[in-house]
Each structure stands twice: as structure tokens, then as C-alpha cells.
Image (cartoon, helix red, strand yellow):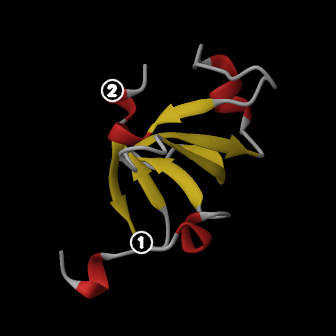
Amino acid sequence: MAEEDKKFSKQLIGKTVVSKTGKRFGEVGDIVFETRSGELIHIVLANPTSYTDKLELEKDKANNILLPFSAVIAIGDFMVVAEEDII
């Protein structure tokens, strides 16, 4: 992996999460990962939009919406997720 491909978690927190078609989901509030392997598991959404409220997405014990990190297809100015991998 090239050095410019690496991102620190603090660079991801607060990024707007959108679908490939431009639908806003909210912002990255936190990232859940497996401590042993370092595998990224979920994105915890902050400030979820009314669109995400209509979807029946996985939630944690604190009722935060979780998106599987495997659905992330690009990270730039926005974090782009494949909506078909979430629903």
C-alpha cells in the first residue's frame, strides 16, 4: 500500500457518508474494528439523515446506526458507500 493510500482514523471522523447516487447518510462518528486483526468492521453514523432513518439498518446497544465498512468503495472529500451492500 502506497503511503498516500493510508488514512488515519482522525481524518475519517466527520466525513460525510454518501451513496454512489449521492444520497446522504450522515457523517462518520466513529469506526469499529477488531482489536486482534485490525479489521475495520463498522462505521458508526453521526447526525444520520431522515433517509437513513427510513432504512432498517443495524444499530448498536446505544441505538447508533452501523454501516458495514465493507460497503465503503471510496474515501476522498466524502466517504462513498455502495447502498446495495448495506440494505
Q: The residue under label 1 is which amino acid type?
A: Gly
Residue 21 position in % (x across, y down): 39, 45
Residue furthest bottom in the image = 3
Residue 65 position in % (x across, y down): 67, 30
Relative depth, front residue between 10 and 79: 10
**Among numbered discs 2 and 1, the one appearing first in the sequence:** 1
Residue furthest left in the image = 1
Relative depth, front residue between 56 and 4: 4
Q: Which residue is labeled 2 in the image?
A: 84
Q: Which quadrant: the C terminus?
A: top left
Q: Quadrant of residue 9?
A: bottom right
Residue plotted at (67% across, 64% down)? 14
Q: Quadrant of residue 16?
A: bottom right
Q: Mark 2: which secondary structure?
A: helix
Q: Eyeballing the image, is 51 above or below 34?
A: above
Q: Which residue is labeled 1 in the image?
A: 76
Residue plotted at (71% across, 39% down)? 49
Q: The residue under label 2 is which amino acid type?
A: Glu
Residue plotted at (42% across, 74% down)? 7
Q: Mark 1: which secondary structure?
A: loop
Is residue 32 left or right of 27 when viewed as pictured? left
Relative depth, front residue between 6 and 87: 6
Residue plotted at (66% across, 21% down)? 59
> Could you classify mark 1 by the number of other residues whose Cα lies within 10 Å: few (under 14), some (14-19), or many (20 or more)?
few
Residue furthest front in the image = 36
Q: Eyeballing the image, is 80 above or below 81?
A: below
Q: Eyeballing the image, is 55 above or below 35?
A: above
In this rendering, the count of numbered labels is: 2
**Residues at marks 2 and 1, CA–CA distance in whole angstroms:** 20 Å
Residue 32 position in % (x across, y down): 56, 43
Residue furthest right in the image = 62
Residue 72 position in % (x across, y down): 36, 47
